[in-house]
Amino acid sequence: MAGGGLMWLAAALAVAGILLLRASWARPVRSTPLNLCAWLALLAAAIVGGIEAGAWGMAVTALVATGAAMLLLAKAVFEQPRWKRPAKQSREVDGSGNDPKAGLSRGIVTFLLAGPIALAVSTLFALAARIALIATGASEADGNVAVLGLVPLVWPILAFALLMFERRTTQFLVTGAVAIATLLSVVLVGGQA
Amino acid sequence: MSFAFAKDTVRKGLDAHSAIGLVCCALLYLICATGTAVVLYEEWQRFEQPDAPEMTSIAPAAVQQGIENVLAAESDRDTTTHLYVHMPTEALPRTTITTDTQAFHVDADGAIVVPEENAWAEFLLALHYRLNLPAVYGMTLVGAFGAMIVALSISGIVAHPRIFRDAFRLRARRRDDVATVDWHNRLAVWSLPFALAIALTGAMIGLFYVSGGSMAASAYGGDSEAAIAPIFGAEAEADLTPAPVADAVPALTYMAREYPDVTPYYVILHDPRTAGQHVQIVGEHERRLIFGEYYAFGPQGEFHGTAGMADGTVGQQLAASIYNLHFGNYGGLPVKIAYIVFGLALTVVIATGTFIWLNKRARQGRPAPRLAAAWWGMVYGVPVALVATFIARLAIGNTAPFVALFWGVLALTVGVALLRKRKCGTSTAGPVLVPAE
C-alpha cells in the first residue's frame, strides 16, 4: 500500500474495528461498550484516512476493513460443524385462488411503475434539484453533476418505496405527487442555468 | 439499544427484494462476472500481445516522432480528428498511438512497431459496459442494473433483520440450503460498501444517456457536450485551415518542469494538422481518486490552463473520481486484487439469491425445475463462455468472432442444462438444486 504513516494507522484502526465487532457480536449478549469501541475505531480509520489522503485514503481504508471482514468470514467457514437439516415434507400450495392472468397484468403494471415511470420521475427530481442548487448559488458544474448523481440514487430508492406499498392507489399517489412537485419547479423556474 | 423493522415491513421488504432480484438476476450476474474480469483490463492486454514493445518511460521527442510517424502512415486517408498517445504506465508500460481508425504500438524512439491487437480485452470491456449492444441502449441497460443493485442493497437490509447480528456466522459446511442463505447474506453484508460504491458509480456512467440527455434537453437545447462542458471543460473552436502538426515536446517539457509530481499518461491531439489544433495532456495525481487532470496547451506548447478535475468544484472532483472508483485502478495491484475478490463475492451473492428463491419455492411445494436448470446453465455458462472466447483469442487470433461465440456458448450451456433436466424428468418431489451440495 502506497502511503505515509497515517495510512498505516488508518488501516490498523480499520482492522481493529472489524476485530472488535467480531468479538462483540460473538458474545451471547452484545456488549454496548465493545460495539461503541468498534464503530469508533472504524470512524477514526475513515477520518485518519481522509486526513492523510482525502477520498483516496477513505476508499483504501474501506477496502482494508472489508478485506479484514472477508478474512474473518473465511475463518468462520471452518468453525461451523457439518450438518444437514432433516428433510421436510414440502407444503402443497392450493393455487386455485390465483388467477395467472391477473397476476401477470399486476406484475407488468408494477414493473412499469417501479421501472421506467420511477426513472422518469427521478430524472425530473434531479433536474429540479439542479435548478434549486444553481438558484441557491451552486456552480453550474456542481448542479450538473448533481443531476448525474441523483438519478441513479433516487430511482432505486423510489422504486423500492413503491414496491413496499401494497395498494396500487398509494403507488400512483406517491409517484404522481413527486412527479407533479418536481415538474412544477422545472416548468415554472425553467431549465436555464 | 436495538433497532428493528416491523414484521410486516420485513415481509414487504423481502417481497420487494425478491421481485427486483428475479427481474434483474441474469443480466446482473453477467455484468458482475464480466466486471470482475475486466478489473484486469490492462493485464489482459499485455497477455494478448506479449511481443509489443514495453518501456517504463518515453522521451518527449520520441512521443512527437511517434505522432508524426502515425500521421504519415495515414497520409492516404482523411486526417484523424483526434489522436491519443497512451504513455507508459505501471499497469500498461507501453506507448500506443490511437487515431479515429486504428492503433499502433511504438518503441522508445517513436518508431511504429506493430498494430495494437487487444480485441479480447476490448470485447470484455464492451460486454461489461454495454452488453455488446449499441452504446445508447447497452449502457443505459447496464446503468439501470447498477441502480437496481442499490435497490437490492436497501431492500436486502430491510428484508433481513438479523443481517448485521449474524454478520460473522457462515454455516458453509452444512449440506442444505442454509449454507446457500448464509453465503448470500454474509457476502452481501460485507461487500455492501463496495457494492454501493461500484453500483452508484456504474449507474452514473451507464445512465448518462438518460440523466445527461435530459439535462441537455431541458437546459442546453439538446446539446449533450454543452451539458458536460462545465464539468470536464469545453472543446475549443475548430479551425480546419491546414497547418503543420502541433508540437507535443514543449507541452511535455512544461509538465515535467511545472508539475513534477504529476505523471502524464495521455497526450491528446485535437484536430491535428489544422489551425485550430491543440494539445491536451491527462496527468495522473498520486493518491487521488480522480482519473487525472486535463492540462491544455496550444499547438506550440503554450499553456492554457487546467479543466479543474483536481482542484475545481466538488462536483468536478466527484465526477472525475467515478471511473477509478468503479474500475479499481487507483492503488495498483493490491486494490485490483481487492476489487476482484469483492467482485467475485458480489457475483456469488447474485447467483445464490436466485437459488434461495428457487429453494423456497420448492419448500412451499411449488418447485420450478426448468427455471432452476436454466439458472444453473446461466451460472456455469457465463464463465464457460468467457473461457471459450479467450481460447478462441489464443487459437484464432485478434479477429475471432468473440461476440457470436460468447452468446452462442452461453445459449448452448443454458439449453444443455434445460435438456438434461428434461431427460432426468420433472418430478416435483426431486431433490432441490443447492450449490452447497
Image (spheres, coloured by chain):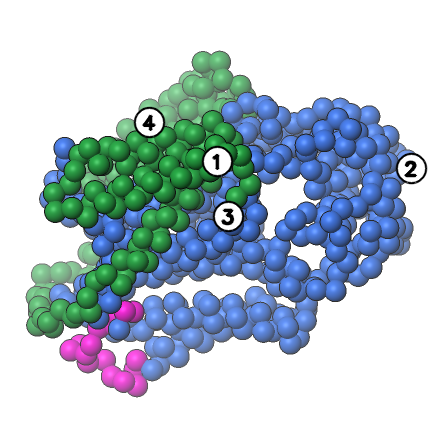
Chain colours: A green, B blue
- Determine if residue B22 is in view: no
Q: What secondary structure characterizes most of the magenta part?
A: loop
N-term-proximal mark, 3 vs 2: 2
Does dot 3 land on a helix, a strand or a loop? helix
Q: Quadrant of the C terminus of chain B?
A: bottom left
What amino acid is at disc 4?
Answer: Ile
Chain assignment, label 4: A
Identify which residue is drawn at 40% across, 33% down. A46
Q: Nearer the viewer, mark 1 or mark 4?
A: 1
According to the picture, the residue beneath numbered tag 3 turns out to be B335
Residues packed near mark 4 inside 10 Å, few (<14), some (14 to 19) or many (20 plus): some
According to the picture, the residue beneath numbered tag 4 turns out to be A180
According to the picture, the residue beneath numbered tag 1 turns out to be A7
According to the picture, the residue beneath numbered tag 2 turns out to be B244
Quarter of the image for residue B240 reads top right
Q: Nearer the viewer, mark 2 or mark 1?
A: 1
What amino acid is at disc 2?
Answer: Pro
Q: Nearer the viewer, residue B141 or B322?
A: B322
Q: Nearer the viewer, residue B152 or B136?
A: B152
